[in-house]
Amino acid sequence: MQRTRWTRLFWDRLGWILALAAMALSLIPLLDILVLVGSRGIRAMSWSVFTQVTSGVSGGLANAIWGTLLIVLVAMLIAAPLGIFGGVYLIEFSPWRLADALRRGSDILTGVPSIVLGYVGYVTMVVWWGWGFSLLAAGITLTMLMLPYILRATELALGKVPSDLRQASLALGAGRAATIWRISLRSAAPGILTGIILALSIAMGETAPLLYTAGWSNYLPTAHLTHAPVGYLTYVVWTYINEPFASAHALAYAAAFLLIFMILAFNVLARWGLERLDPHARGARR
């Protein structure tokens, strides 16, 4: 009996050691990339990176920074409401057959390569609709990329809200809309926010869809939604790192560092905003 106990303990400890070793091996490449991009990106930072536009393989990244923020903003303004309302519809209103079909469609859209979405956006919006390379075409294309993540995250988060809360709200005289807004969505806010952050992070790191829809511009973005190409940071990373010039490499590392920093900043701000708005989330963290 004692021997069996020690044998189980040995295999249990061995399993934990192998799991930790596998995790360490998977983190080594990630840490190497973060250290490389962080060290070279910080050295490449200067005031001109934020105040000047790109000029050839030198200059700054002002046009790419503002272009990235605007493209993501347009995509988020479209994808977030559609994804949240779609998740609410799947949980609260949709017949199960339609809900199942929508879930399958969302899963299929998640598996579509982003370059295919970019080509679809190019054929439809850039060519057929005549928008040209533009902010709106890029934003709608990223919306197609972000929407399934937000929709599924919203559906899963709402599905975890206890039915007792809904029933209690209805029993106290609250309408269905008030129950969804004040009970279901509020309780599911952390999960929904996680889906939005995930979709935002994926969208900010995309290059292929934007090559087909946003094009590229060395100028600051204008107020025009169509017929105006837009610069973005991932283009600088993808293109300039292959140039045989030190100035181009510096801009590429600076752009990569800014992308990582912006994604981390969005995560921190989103979590901070959730804690400010929802005292239950703040209490749970404590």
Image (cartoon, rainbow, N blue to C red):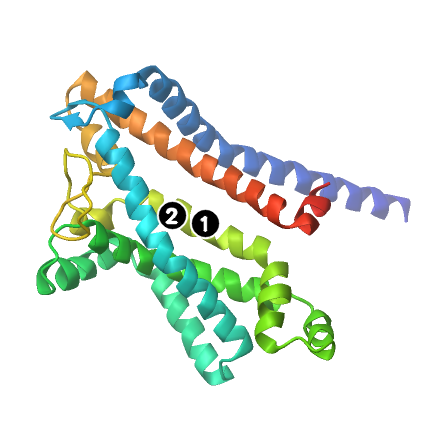
Q: Residues within 10 Å of mark 1 (few under 14, many from 20)?
A: some
| Helix, strand or loop under label 1 | helix
Q: Position of residue 50 (x, y in %)?
A: 29, 25
Q: Is residue 159 visible?
A: yes
Question: Total marks drawn?
Answer: 2
Note whether 196 is above or below 238 in the view shown: below
Residue sitting nearer the eye, 142 or 78: 78
Q: Residue at x 59, y 70 (%)?
A: 180
Q: Residues within 10 Å of mark 2 (few under 14, many from 20)?
A: some
Q: Amino acid at mark 2?
A: Ile
Q: Residue at x 34, y 43 (%)?
A: 204
Q: CA distance from mark 1 to mark 2?
A: 6 Å
Q: Position of residue 221 (x, y in %)?
A: 20, 40
Q: Amino acid at mark 1?
A: Leu
Q: Which mark is residue 202?
A: 2
Q: Which residue is mark 1?
A: 198
Q: Residue at x 18, y 42 (%)?
A: 222
Q: Is there CB contact under 8 Å for labels 1 and 2?
A: yes
Q: Is residue 160 visible?
A: no
Q: Is residue 8 left or right of residue 201?
A: right
Residue sitting nearer the eye, 226 or 55: 226
Q: Residue at x 15, y 53 (%)?
A: 226
